[in-house]
Image (cartoon, grey):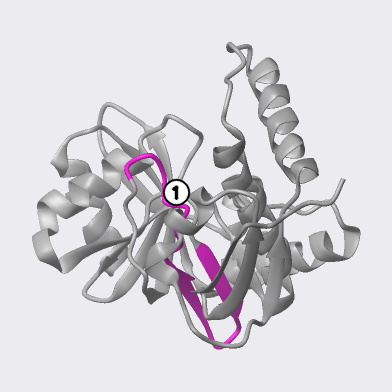
Amino acid sequence: MQVKWSMKGTYKIAGRVIAVASIYEKVHALCADYRYDGTADFSVITTQKEIEYERNKSRNEDIKEGISVRHFSDEYLETLAVYRQIAEAMIAYDAILFHGSVIAVDGIGYLFTAKSGTGKSTHTRLWRALLGERAVMINDDKPLIHVSEHGIMVYGTPWDGKHRLSTNASVPLKAICVLERAEENHMEQVTADYVYDMLVQQVYRPQNPQKLLRTLQLIDVLSENVKLYKLGCNMDISAAETAYKAMKG
């Protein structure tokens, strides 16, 4: 059976031009703010095989977590398949997908990461309440980070969480903070060794051995070139005050 890719588009994401050919339209609506007219650096093509891979992966994760198996449409699962291919290709350009919430203040990026359900999005919302227009959401879920010894840049992407909070922009990344729930706010700067396991867990890790090795190398460079923190926080705006004061330096 011949697959017909009825939907095509070209987008510029994290500095790279990507041609996308899909079965469904949903991914192109998702990426509408990133449309770009130019020669592609690489192409992404999805088939039903990639969609079924995402369905099985989601099902296995639900079973592992002991929750009811969620049922997603093919259209939605295709958006995940497209981003997986983008994440795989971006490694060759020294860019990695990171699970976290990134906010920029006065043009400088701060990334918050944690186990699911800890409150990353809630915390960056407190930053916006505290700092007003000075604070801009870069991406609330899955930003891309370009890693270089000359500087770390973080990019907004269309894959920006259930609240759809992102900006088609890039900013230098100054710090990464691991969040933990606590009754009283307390923050400390930590070493790369202290948070390394969390960094690895939150980065997209390809199955290909060469790509995985390069990903781990990029995590090393990332951890050496941004400040790293651990924040025990409550859900009060005072948590944002504590974090911003420490991370701004």
Give the residue drawn at x 55%, y 56%: 98
Where does label 1 land, which residue?
141
Quadrant, the N terminus: top right
Where in the figure is residue 146, as x and y percent of width and height? 56, 74
Residue 189 image offset from top left, x and y in percent: 42, 57
Find residue 83 and report its image quarter.
Answer: bottom right
Q: Answer few, some or many: residues within 10 Å of disc 1's Cα (few below 14, many 20 plus, some between 14 and 19).
A: many
Quadrant of the image occupied by residue 35: bottom left
Q: Is residue 198 visible from the viewing direction of this image?
A: no
Amino acid bearing label 1? Asp
Q: In the visual, does 218 lie left or right of 206?
A: left
The reply to whether the magenta stretch includes residue 162 is: yes
Above or below, 154 against 209 in this view is below
Which residue is at 69% across, 31% downward? 55
Locate residue 26, reporting x and y percent.
50, 48
Magenta-colored span:
144-163
Direction from residue 200 to residue 13 in the image, left or right: left
Q: In which quarter of the image is the C terminus?
A: bottom left
